[in-house]
Image (tube, grey):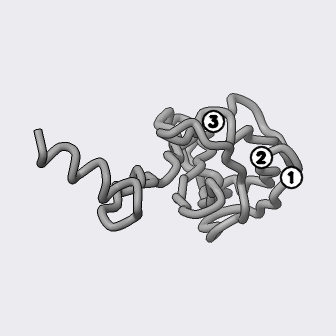
Amino acid sequence: MSTIILAIAMTWFGILSIPAPRNLPPVAVNDEVFVGGYTNYLEIPVFANDYDPEGQPIEVIALGTVYLGKAELLEGGAVGVSPVYPTDRDPDHYKPVLIAHGTYIISDGLLTSTGHWYVWH
């Protein structure tokens, strides 16, 4: 009993501190879009499926590397994409072809995570 009272007293006076809950990074879920026809521009709502494990508000803070195509960060957590279509594609070849790919970064205010977006044709 005296041990419990001592622990309570030490906590009360700040001698024994209780560790704060650990902040986990937000989760950026990869996004894939399949385009059936040809388009010069499309918007991907990359932020729509991302979340923070503690429920803290998150936001897209930057566009990362764009590996294929052109991209811009839009308001509201979307990425505007201008894909690049291959010029030497076999018309009888029906396997999807990657026409745009890049990354984006989300934050909960303290920690960040990187997600990938892909556009297939």
Instruction: Left or right? Give the position of 41 relative to 16.
Output: right
Frontmost of labels 2 and 3 is 2
Specify the amino acid type for callout 2: Gly
Residue at 30%, 62% (x, y): give it.
16
Specify the amino acid type for callout 3: Val
Q: Which residue is mark 2?
A: 77
Q: Which residue is mark 1?
A: 74
Query: In the current view of this chain or complex, which residue is farthest to the top?
Result: 36
Mark 1 or mark 3, which is nearer the start of the sequence? Answer: 3
Mark 3 or mark 2, which is nearer the start of the sequence? Answer: 3
Residue at 61%, 42% (x, y): give it.
56
Mark 3 lies on a secondary structure that is strand
Are dots 1 and 2 in contact, CB under 8 Å?
yes
Residue 33 image label: 3
Mark 1 lies on a secondary structure that is strand
- Work out which quarter of the rendered image holds the C terminus and state it: top right
Q: CA distance from mark 3 to mark 1?
A: 17 Å
Q: CA distance from mark 2 to mark 3?
A: 16 Å
- Pinpoint residue 41: horizontal percent, then vertical percent: 85, 46
Mark 1 surroundings within 10 Å by alpha-carbon count, few (fewer than 14), some (14 through 19), many (20 or more): some
Question: Which of the two residues, 60 or 57, is positioned nearer the viewer here?
Answer: 57
Q: Which image quadrant for residue 70?
A: bottom right
- Pinpoint residue 81: horizontal percent, then vertical percent: 78, 52
- Pinpoint residue 20: horizontal percent, then vertical percent: 41, 54
Specify the amino acid type for callout 1: Leu
Residue at 59%, 49% (x, y): give it.
117
| Vertical arrangement, residue 2 with respect to residue 72, above or below | above
Residue at 46%, 37% (x, y): give it.
95
Mark 2 lies on a secondary structure that is loop
| Vertical arrangement, residue 11 with respect to residue 5, above or below | below
